Image (cartoon, coloured by chain):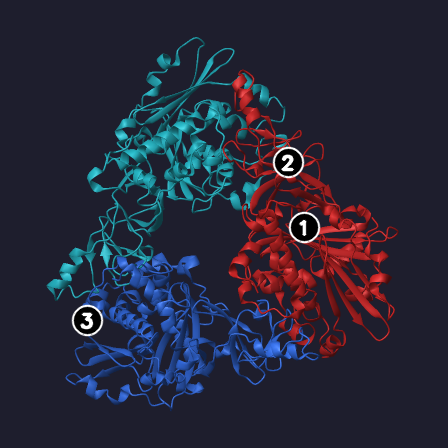
Chain colours: A cyan, B red, C blue
Amino acid sequence: MLTPQENDRLTRVGKGTPMGEAFRRYWIPALLSEELAEPDCPPVRVRLLGEDLVAFRDTNGDAGLVDAFCPHRRAPMFFGRNEECGLRCVYHGWKFDTNGTCVDMPSEPALSSSNGSLFKTKVAIAAYPTFEAGGFVWTYMGPRETIPPPPDYEFVRAPATHRYPSKTLEECNWLQALEGGVDSSHATIMHNMNIGDRSWLHDFEATVPRLDLERTDYGFSYSGVRTLPDHQWVRVYHFVMPTIQMRGTIQGSDLQEGYIPRIDGHLWIPIDDENTWVFNFMYSYDPATPLSHEEALGVETRAGRGPDDLTPDYRAKRNKHNDYLIDRALQKSASFTGIKGVNTQDFAVQEAMGPIVDRSKEHLGTTDRAVITTRQLLLEATRAVERGEMPLGSDPTAARAVRPADHRIACGLDWRVTLRDELIARY
Amino acid sequence: MLTPQENDRLTRVGKGTPMGEAFRRYWIPALLSEELAEPDCPPVRVRLLGEDLVAFRDTNGDAGLVDAFCPHRRAPMFFGRNEECGLRCVYHGWKFDTNGTCVDMPSEPALSSSNGSLFKTKVAIAAYPTFEAGGFVWTYMGPRETIPPPPDYEFVRAPATHRYPSKTLEECNWLQALEGGVDSSHATIMHNMNIGDRSWLHDFEATVPRLDLERTDYGFSYSGVRTLPDHQWVRVYHFVMPTIQMRGTIQGSDLQEGYIPRIDGHLWIPIDDENTWVFNFMYSYDPATPLSHEEALGVETRAGRGPDDLTPDYRAKRNKHNDYLIDRALQKSASFTGIKGVNTQDFAVQEAMGPIVDRSKEHLGTTDRAVITTRQLLLEATRAVERGEMPLGSDPTAARAVRPADHRIACGLDWRVTLRDELIARY
Amino acid sequence: MLTPQENDRLTRVGKGTPMGEAFRRYWIPALLSEELAEPDCPPVRVRLLGEDLVAFRDTNGDAGLVDAFCPHRRAPMFFGRNEECGLRCVYHGWKFDTNGTCVDMPSEPALSSSNGSLFKTKVAIAAYPTFEAGGFVWTYMGPRETIPPPPDYEFVRAPATHRYPSKTLEECNWLQALEGGVDSSHATIMHNMNIGDRSWLHDFEATVPRLDLERTDYGFSYSGVRTLPDHQWVRVYHFVMPTIQMRGTIQGSDLQEGYIPRIDGHLWIPIDDENTWVFNFMYSYDPATPLSHEEALGVETRAGRGPDDLTPDYRAKRNKHNDYLIDRALQKSASFTGIKGVNTQDFAVQEAMGPIVDRSKEHLGTTDRAVITTRQLLLEATRAVERGEMPLGSDPTAARAVRPADHRIACGLDWRVTLRDELIARY
């Protein structure tokens, strides 16, 4: 439970807001690399932290991310012509490169007058730096003097043959989406697709995990250990500030599908206060086992965000406008939600909370510890920025080596010792 | 004509507003019984007086009406699973009965810890009491200590074989809808479907009624007596606070269809400040004559709200988004409006006034007396509640015995004497 | 570049705003004459300067423009019955003529009581004067005591056989639409449909015009003179306050189509702060050469607003909701925009600036002189009205005689002398 003021502080991300300024101290993904398919391809609209931008890939293949409006008369750069290492506004022909520099200004008498030339050098379009890695085009929207080293997480370094990036639009505030991610306690209920035999409650009680949360210099790690008759089941995920979750998926929900040495995760990136891009990653952490496209699409499809589940602009076809195609008969017989797809179930609950959930009306329990810690870390980040400091985890190297886990080990062992090597990134 | 302040006071119905608090001292219908088709059926979204709620029918057949959001983390109860005498939130599995009591909390360690148990007993979901009668699920949204006796009007007591309840969405403030109901003077113009012979004006002048309005302890009764060559035509309707109209329909507009001993009426229930549920009732007041389904559907269809006129969610197919399919040729030749269906004509005029009509720009005439009285009664009700009193008519027994009339009697008789027995409810 | 306060002052047009009051000192077109096809035809919704109105043509053929809501109970006059020299509200039958006078009030006891009669004479519906000319129904929405003489421009006086009026909805503030009109410098870039041979830049540089702007007693005239190897190309357009552009089109973009002795123009009329009617006119200025319907439709189609380009309610089918059907391949090969139709290109740029462009973020150059002057004139008009004076150009006779030009003349001549007669209206 938060005060309305704290809720505002945490959820609003526009320029000048506390959380908006905190977000502007981190590298975040702006779009997928695949959205800028080739040099000189059409520009793409990007809305990020409430700012309207346009992304383009220039003739050299470099990604640019500039103001959505031309500095001359505020014409829309989305209709711009992407040509010869620059994006040309079609209103009066001003042209800008990926740095925002004006490289052509045909409407002004530049050739005949030194003043015209001068004007060109004085005008630039606002541009944010980009860094392309892991299938994402990352950007940093804060002050240039505090720009951190570029993203350097294991999922960013995994070879292209071993990874699969994707994204989905979620129509609510980023924080309630993120909170659904760090909250592992809902999985046994909401994602349970097998309640027909009424044994779910018994299973649930039988497998209540021993939970532990440890703060780190990038956020926190969260472990759940279940003691089963013949082994211990250990799951460790990492929350990396401000909005990354990395988790193991070797076993557990995917157990029956055969061994895929995979690590998964999400980044919940605010489009604005009421819309979120959920960027997803998965990668094979075994260098000897590439992640095939078919395997990746299978995972995406089971999550509810496969190629048949999304429109070309990354919107879910089962969405809040059609009640996620809830099947009330299925809800009676097989699953708590009656909704197809784990991610779709998450979206259903999170979006239907409303655009920004009112956290002053909550009643948190003991299993909400990860949610509570996440909020504390984010509030601390806003205060650090207000003090002029860089917030926790803004230097990506802090999480350079971390890796989550999902393993079964023998009874009696201390997982922190047994799994020590498994928890260190090897890419 | 009202001041803008009075207009606000009368039209706004959110929690804490004067009229909103007045409404919260009366039983009002929340939805139709048919919307909760059977025990453990899917829950139904209900928005009432600006509050988002969810209705469900439990395993015992009892109707529950609870907050739309779970008290734990504000997940949407609409996606809840209706099971074994309770509605279970699908996020973390908390389950609530129709009283709002938490009857299961699997996410918390309830079995192993007394604290867990304790937390379950401390948390409840907001729930309003329900009462099912007359084909409606009624609710009372005010303080429990002032809850009045349940609805006890004749249309509520009429046997199921003799009545027909329905509802339609009206996309404007409840008060302008209600005012259209109590204003009988528009009928000769707006609902006139027979102006082709140009005799309408003559008919109109020939039948100007002698109007009378009498305040009562439930609202007012309004009588119109027309003196015709060979008889008097007496119509008496009742306005029952805060939002019920009961009227006779034996003769008059239905005259040509044969004798149906019917009483009709509406309740205009605010969804929020800009949307209204019009609940409709009709019943045969003759115990010997049931109201057949066919007869009822015929009446509904003539009103413009028959099965072919509405979508499954009770929205009119002829609505403001398609200009009510106005037929301008028909408007030239046959009716003033060119719009099909008496209720559709009402909706066209009332909705197209805008979401909340600006009553400071009105010019009221002598025939607007019922409208004026209605506003006075409602303003008085808001002030009574502000003084800590229960407002006029909040105890439904005040209107227990009332019955409207629509009769023809011999010339020279005093209708108050002649019709005395006809004006007393017999169910 | 303007301050945010100046931007507000210039763009907002509601009642009581500075620019709104300035607009209310000029005759402006309310709708096309063709929208009121014949006497007693259906009424038409008109929204103008943020006010909701209804237009109708009475039995005598006179156009009326009245409040959208009946003064009695604010019922919508759009559903009114247009009959026998008046528009009758269908709620209670009150009827008003084109002057707003109540000519019938059947709901009140007018025949039997002098009070009823009296009430009828006391109530009127708000009505604005109309004047029909040039294919437009003009209105004046300001104080009656300052009403100027009616519109008297040459395009208004051109014979019906020689002119073609039209209109298109533009979904943004009127001023950014107008500014696109007076800004001639974008034409070589944005409307260039022939860039495939890469010679456009050379052509552009080779034909940089000598620009001149002259303030007048109706606004300003703007001339561009290009010195070509064997002649001078002279274009003169007029900006007539507050929102008319008149321009020659004899030569230039239409050169290859053969000689059409045509003058074109636009009026950008605010629907409200965020929507605009662009009224278009064209006429043959040669009395001996009528403008055929086919020729007119050809011009409209090339502009992107032909019969196939618009819906029946004058909306563009290529619009902001479908990105103007931009063809990115065409943008690579043939035109800067990849968008079909000169006017569609204008709309694309202007609408995608957002509802009201933020002029405090602009960087204006030397070619923005017409835009700057337009803003100065409009700001001066708002101040004149605030001083109680009539603003520049509010008397249409000031621009009675003006005519634009688009001519080629021999080298060495002074176009002001050579074209003196061509610049005087002859209708």
Which residue is denoted by mark 1 in the rendering?
A: B392
Quadrant of the rendered image containing residue C386: bottom left
Mark pair 2, 3: CA separation = 72 Å
Vertical arrangement, residue A206 with respect to residue C395, above or below: above
Residue B282 falls in image quadrant: bottom right
Q: The disc labelled 1 sits on which kind of residue?
A: Leu
Q: Where is residue B325 in the image (x, y as percent from the top left)?
A: 62, 65
- Residues B338 and C2: in front is C2
- Name the residue carrying label 3: C208
Judging depth in this view, the residue of A408 and A179 nearest the camera is A179
Q: Residues within 10 Å of mark 1 (few under 14, many from 20)?
A: many
Q: Mark 2 points at which residue?
A: A329
Q: Is mark 3 on a helix, strand or loop?
A: loop
Please state which amino acid type lies under the numbered disc 2.
Ala
Residue B389 in percent (x, y) is at 63, 45
- Residue A382, compared with residue C222, is above or below; it is above
Output the chain of dot 2. A
